[in-house]
Image (cartoon, rainbow, N blue to C red):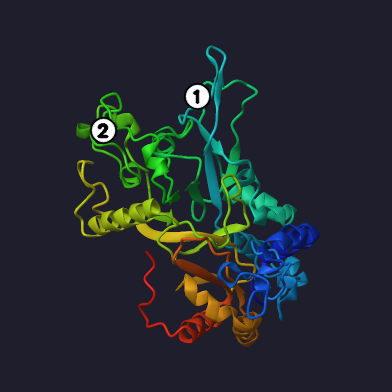
Amino acid sequence: MGIPNFQGRVTAKNNNITAAAANQGSKGVTSQARTGGTGSSVDRATACRAGPNASRDTTRSPDPTQLPGAAMNFPEFKLLPFEMRMKIWRHAMDQSPRLIELEWTDCGNSTTGFITGTHEWWRVCPRSRKLPVIMQVCRESMKEGRLYLEYRCFDSDNDRLPSDVTYEIYSNPRADIIFFGENTCVTTMLNLFSETPAVPDVPIPRVAVLCSARGEHCCDHDDAADGVRGGVQIMHALHGFEKAVTNHNWRYGGCTGLEEVHFIVKSRLWQRGAGEIDWTVGLRPATTEGLSPTEVAVKRRLERQIAWVNDDYGIPRTGKFAWANKKPVFRFSSLAPVSTYEEEVHDSVVVEAEDVEHLEENGWAFIEDLEQRTGCIIHIPQEIPGEPFREIGFVGSKEAVVKAKEMVRSKLMYSPNEPQAN
């Protein structure tokens, strides 16, 4: 008797409701591209492939109702003792981390009116405000979620008009991740860490930050008024500054209780735009260095700073090293759909762009055979002219994905360290 796959049940329900729209929406992306090959009218250099079904929505995982042996019902659950059911609900909530995306917003107050175009105010994106999936399963899970999760406001709250309300959301500090995405910057980070509305110094254990120079350059805080010589970078905002090195130490204290940091590296696979993060979006290990030279430079600088932290060297210009006794765990991750069953993983491998032609031969015969042999679904996004490398995405069990990746690398005759994406 195993733990029921509650998230899989909700995923299946939502996938069934949106199936028709998803199929229509994805046809324009994958309609002819996967037929590119010998004798095809599609340019082989720009072809892409999205798995065995050309009309499949590539932003979602396989429908769990179509997986062999997927348990969608567990009628005996209600017969379990009450205490055991509550523990199962809580365990399920801890196994379903969410990305909670923040974004800039306008501010309004009764004295000055609305203020637009500033980065001093922020909010949780509407899609990220929705109830956690587990709380939507039934009345009992809803009640237990209200007891187990935190009801907390992550919006800025500076003399807003009554009509411009803040939103409390249910969040799980043991699992959920606060995501500073496209429409945030270091100002958003500094303000949230120092001015969490009505609850100062409340820990935020897990954060994700987009690897982007834009978030540092639009508000670099490098002037006398802000009081930080040399400006504020992503790692500075996370760590914080000692009072002696800034004139405004109330704003630069760093993230309280930080345990885990995901630096989000952009990818052509499973992309989501600003404001599109909801419960269907999760994380996977990053396999690229970024999509532009600037993003690559930011990632490499973060790698150096992580090495300094792990070696107890500290972060230059921040004063006393605040993480000497307890260091956060740092990871480079990319966005991916959440898994629809326990063993499912999303992963990718980087290949040289010109080598995709070898995989495309005979109408993607090698890839289709590989899908049949391993059970994986394989995605190859459209080529972007000028990019020397491309990612190939794999969805399936961990064992199947490892096997499929090895077979692709063997087909292209790569050594263990090839290629090196730049």
- Mark 1 neighbour class, 10 Å CA radius: few under 14, some 14 to 19, many 20 or more: few
Residue 344 shown left or right of residue 317 in the figure: right
Q: Give me the residue at 35% from left, 78% from top.
A: 417
What percent of the width, then of the height, locates residue 99?
A: 54, 52
> Which residue in the protein does label 2 denote?
228
Vertical relation: 131 (above or below) 201:
below
Real-space Cα distance between discs 2 and 1?
24 Å
> Could you tell me which residue is drawn at 37 percent across and 51 percent down?
294
Question: What amino acid is at disc 2?
Answer: Val
Q: Which quarter of the rendered picture does the N terminus lie within?
A: bottom right
Which amino acid lies under the numbered mark 1 shown in the image of this protein?
Asn
Relative image position of residue 219 (x, y in whole percent): 38, 34
**SS at badge 2:** loop
Task: Please rate how many residues cluster around mark 2, counting C-alpha atoms within 10 Å: few if below 14, some from 14 to 19, many from 20.
Answer: many
Q: Is residue 65 above or below residue 150?
A: below
What residue is at 66 percent from the left and 69 percent from the top? 33
Instruction: Say how many tags the image has.
Output: 2
**Relative vertical location of residue 177 with respect to residue 231 in this rendering, above or below:** below
Compare residues 404 and 422 and report the one nearer the observer: 422
Circle 2 or circle 1, nearest the eye: 2
Residue 6 lies, in percent from the top left, at 68, 64
Residue ID for mark 1:
158
The C terminus - image quarter: bottom left
* Residue nearest the observer in this picture, 117 or 83: 117
For residue 291, which quarter of the picture? Answer: bottom left
Residue 234 appears in the rendering: yes
Mark 1 secondary-structure assignment: loop
